Amino acid sequence: MADPITARVLFSVWSGDPAVVVPSPPGAGKTRLVALLAAALAHRADLRVGIAAQTREQAVEIARRLGALTDRAALIWKAKAPLPDSGNTPVVTGRKARWPNDTGAILIGTTARWLFSDPDRIGADVLIVDEAWQCTYADLGALGAMARQVVCVGDPGQIAPVVTGDVSRWSDSETAPNLPAPLALQAAHGDSVGVVRLQHTWRLGARTTALIQPLFYPGLPFTSRRPPEHLSESSGPDLPELAHRPVRVIGGPTDPVLATQCAQRARELLDADVTTPDGQRAMTAADLAVVVPHVTQAAAVRALLSDHPDVLVGTANSLQGLERAAVVVLHPLAGYRTAEPFNLDPGRACVMLTRHRAHMTVVIDDATAHVLEHAEPSPAHATHTGLMAALHCTTIV
């Protein structure tokens, strides 16, 4: 097999490893890996391969990818819901999901769908959990009834699973049911869990990789293999890969200056050109995103950019998994005078800072450095302190 990472994961599965974890940096081709791995296991080993995605959108994207690789895949969908555009992959609903009797095959569904399925009816030989760091250890344990072998693929820097119940009783446990599944799985079973690391990002440039990797991925060294891509002013120099815009905030996180500066910077970037290996062209609204911590901030920015509806504006949660040529980021601590757990969450910051390919501008509150100086020390605090120092070394725009 030409792809060495896929070959290593295949070898681990064929060797009988009960669990394989594949940690990945942002933009490393996780969806491509999942599709290639599933197709190879179904065709070369005649295995029944289940794929558990964390959202319906992710399941549909995987189905589209597999439709270009194999005719042995099917997407499991809710019976009364409108059918999605799954490309060449057929959609099966409810109890119509079945394995063929004589060949390997692939069934794709959300984790929630698999958890409500009958193992005796659609149990798989191998279950691939996509975006596994968004899956709780409790859900992974339940998914274990569906297959003898599990492969967990995902980004360890992403936002942890959202759990609404009280989990304080497990606060000191390395195998807590609310933890990201791969973390707890490795803590529980140690070296019996195979690990294959993705080592390159095809999205982030060298400057961004140097910023992000030591802060958010200390246990996952990776390098940039992004093709050359940059922004330039229409009649001026190239824009740096990373920049920041300091602002003075007096009205808290809803201070209009924050949304205004994000929108203003977005308009400036829309006047730029983007250069890729395919050539130079003008930026379009579809090339740009603005990512903010809160839904109310997103609504304010969206209103200010209402004449550019194709600009993607949203929170870290809503933009997780997406990318654009250029991104404007509102720092998660902007407007705050105390460092709250939500704003210090490393996963949220990591997602916000890794949506761009060619350029990112971070809008920073002048007071945030002072807030961090007086915050209670913690690993998340240390990450944000290092991040703030690094951002202040970037170009001011």
Image: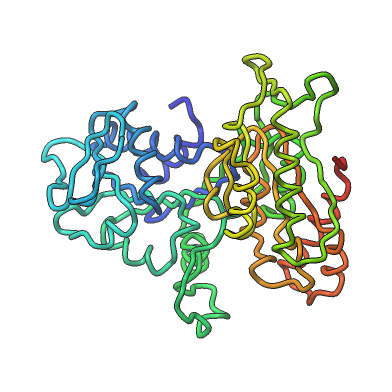
Circle count: 0
**Front residue of this view, candidates 164 and 63:** 164
In the picture, measured across the screen, residue 162 lies left or right of residue 289, that is left
Residue 233, relative to residue 75: is it above or below? above
- Percent coordinates x, y for residue 375 in the rendering: 80, 74
Task: Tell me the quarter of the image containing the N terminus.
Answer: top left
Q: Quadrant of residue 396?
A: top right
Residue visible at 82% across and 68% down in the picture: 372
**Front residue of this view, candidates 26 and 77:** 77
- Percent coordinates x, y for residue 10 in the rendering: 40, 39
Residue visible at 62% across and 27% down in the picture: 284
Residue visible at 87% across and 70% down in the picture: 373
**Front residue of this view, candidates 334 and 14:** 334
Residue 287, relative to residue 82: is it above or below? above
Q: Quadrant of residue 19?
A: bottom left
In the picture, measured across the screen, residue 299 lies left or right of residue 338, that is left
